[in-house]
Image: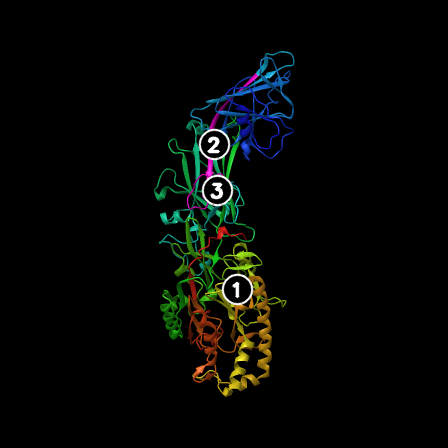
Amino acid sequence: MCRQKAQRCAPAGWDQAVLISSLLPAFIIPSCRPRQHSRVCGGMAQQRRVQLCTQRPTSTVCVLGTELSLDIQGSAPKDAIAFHVQGTPGVKVYVVHETQSVKLPSSVTRWPLSAGTEVLLTMEAISKDVGDEKVRVSYFGEASGVPVGRAMLYLTCVEVSLDADTGRSGSVSRTLVDKATWTWGPDGHGAILLVNCDRDDPKSRLTGDGSEPKSQPTDNRDTTVCSYEDLKDMSQMVLRTRGPRTIFTGHGLVLHVGFSDADKVGVFYGGNSIALEEYKHVLGGEKLAYAVKPSRHQEESIFYVEGLAFPDAGFSGLVAFHVTLLESSEKGFLETPIFTDTVVFRVAPWIMTPNTLAPLEVFVPSVEDNEDFVAAISALAEEAKCPVTICPLPENRNDRWIQDEVEFGYVQAPHKTFPVVFDSPRDRGLKDFPVRSILGPDFGYVAQKTPENTSSLDSFGNLEVSPPVTVRSKEYPLGRILIGSSFPRFGGRRMAKAVRNFLAAQRVQAPVELFSDWLQVGHVDEFLSFIPAPDRKGFRLLLASPSACYQLLREKQEMGYGEATMFQGLHGVPKPSINEILANEALRKFNAYAQSCISWNRDILKRELGLAEQDIIDIPQLFQADDQTRAMAYFPDMVNMLVLGRHLGIPKPFGPLVAGQCCLEERVRALLQPLGLSCTFIDDFFSYHKLAGEVHCGTNVRRKPFAFKWWRMVP
């Protein structure tokens, strides 16, 4: 029976080990040499070397879940050649050896004092009193059966544990998983940290003249807890200390963070108080360590942790916190670390939301000449049962391009989710709007510092995200980010490196670069959009298509409508007929070039999003060349639309009238209405189109977060 118990509890992987408990003689588990990586009871326990002394008793602490390795050789009398070890019932003693022990008539098992012999101790219960368990080592010479020396070790078992929500349940609990690692996937583990980038303090305002919104402090830029709502944004980290309280009086306990991580996090602690003013900033920034003084009556200390930075180039998003138990040395010497527990957090990424997610709020600026446009957007939003926020002229400074200024996304942890607006580097009239009017309680803000010589490609009309896709068995459950760039042409415009690095570092929506530098403005939303669909992948990709437009116009010409003209009802605008458009050779050649650019992107999108031709709808569109031979929409660009669920706000193209109906509108309805979508064509000709933008450029949407939790994916 005893032999079986010893075999069950002995460290898996040791080839010869003996368990000695309750002062019983040892048993032997025959085998060969020990393997190096296993530890007591099959785990990977933290191990500490303990020095013994035959002149006086030694005392030390054994932290629950760790093992002590006794320095048998270091304390042995010079004539000793063997030893015997015994422990009280609360101590498990393991002898790891390479040779058989020698059995004497006294039935006392002696182990040779060889370099290959090791004694390991573990304890499985918290001590009630200091030194209430002990181990005795007796040393023997070559001839005598009487010990030539004895070493006594008094042990106190305590628990020191640093815990977080590593199980991702929304609450902190003890766990058997490795807290010092962080893994992705449905069976992954590891705690999650939110960047506390909202502003819960209602008293916080812009500083100075308000001209520097990018430097505006959010909650993660101060070292105070603004409110109880501020605490709710943070993740809890619980330090548990159990055992005789006098032990913690004589030992130090330090919570610390590495130098490279310190500027990424802030930690607050309120002690035993629930009063807001008692919460102090104890870790992060220049504070690398905090001396914890456990209460005599409280075994748990709750710390609140906030993120200060999103993952980015040079920062993986992983942050490690440590608690270290320090043992007092002789007077005048520094304390000695005897145990460290570690917990790792990952900072939650910023996540974009595609058109296929439900709209929660529409934003549209009101400027000097777009009253009808704002009314049309408001009516469409009312149909979609979606609230509208109108950005007034004093806040937008006559800047109508809100899609270019910001991108709405969100951050999520098991305990909290809130929206976060990403402010683009463009900084025109709307530059203060995100901070003045959007940033607030449970609405965060993030921006990236970029060089001052930004291009049009740094505006966020050049930043889109696909719905969820699967590509060659690789799942992207949160879709993939799409940005426009200059390849395959060299020396063109690209999105700022700081923004591209930021997007890639989030890891959950792996970016795809498309070719958009052929366009005058250079934004991906000028030639693509996504709409919801009831079948296949749950969406369709819309692509602007000059070839589809020429095909449509030729059809109408063959039907006898060659004299039908464009732009009816628009004053002061030339009105070319179908015949004239088809006869314009320069226009045809330029659109052949535009089509080749879109076709290049079509191939990339099919490859990188795993799309088939059935997933793509070609929307008729023509382009014309500017002075630098870059493309501009010839008529309002219909793919540049506002998607509010099944309700689409599409730029009114003012195409040729056939039987009293715009043939371009009719074709788009025929393509999209079978998918259950409602098409509303909005006149943006003078207020947006003539200024090189359309409906999507002049609006923005905050959408519902994904139901899928980002930590369950595998990047």
Task: Give amino acid for label 3.
Answer: Lys
Amino acid identity at mark 1: Asp
Please state the extent of the stretch shown in magenta in the rendering.
150-176
Which residue is drawn at the image coordinates 46% and 72% (left, top)? Answer: 672
Mark 3 to mark 2 CA distance (whole Å)? 18 Å
Q: Are marks 3 and 1 in contact (CB under 8 Å)?
A: no
Element under disc 3 = loop
- Is residue 544 among the parts visible in the rendering? yes
Label 3 or label 2, whichever comes before in sequence order:
2
At which x and y percent is residue 350?
Answer: 48, 55
Disc 2 on helix, strand or loop? Answer: strand
Residue picked out by circle 3: 287
Q: Which residue is labeled 2 in the image? A: 252
Q: Nearer the viewer, mark 3 or mark 1?
A: 1
Name the residue nearer the viewer: 53 or 705. 705
Describe the element under mark 1 as helix, strand or loop.
helix
Residue that extends furthest to the front in the rendered view of this protein: 1
Q: Position of residue 234 (x, y in %)?
A: 42, 47
Whole-Å distance between the Cαs marked 3 and 1? 36 Å
195 over 273 or under it: above or below: below
**Position of residue 374 in the picture relative to residue 105 (left or right):** left
Name the kind of residue labelled 2 in the image: Gly
Q: Does residue 118 lie above or below 617 as drawn?
A: above
Query: In the rendered structure, does residue 170 fall within the stretch colored magenta?
Result: yes
- In the rendering, at what x and y percent does residue 366 appear? 39, 70
Q: Which mark is residue 530?
A: none
Instruction: Please tell me the numbered disc located at residue 458.
Output: 1
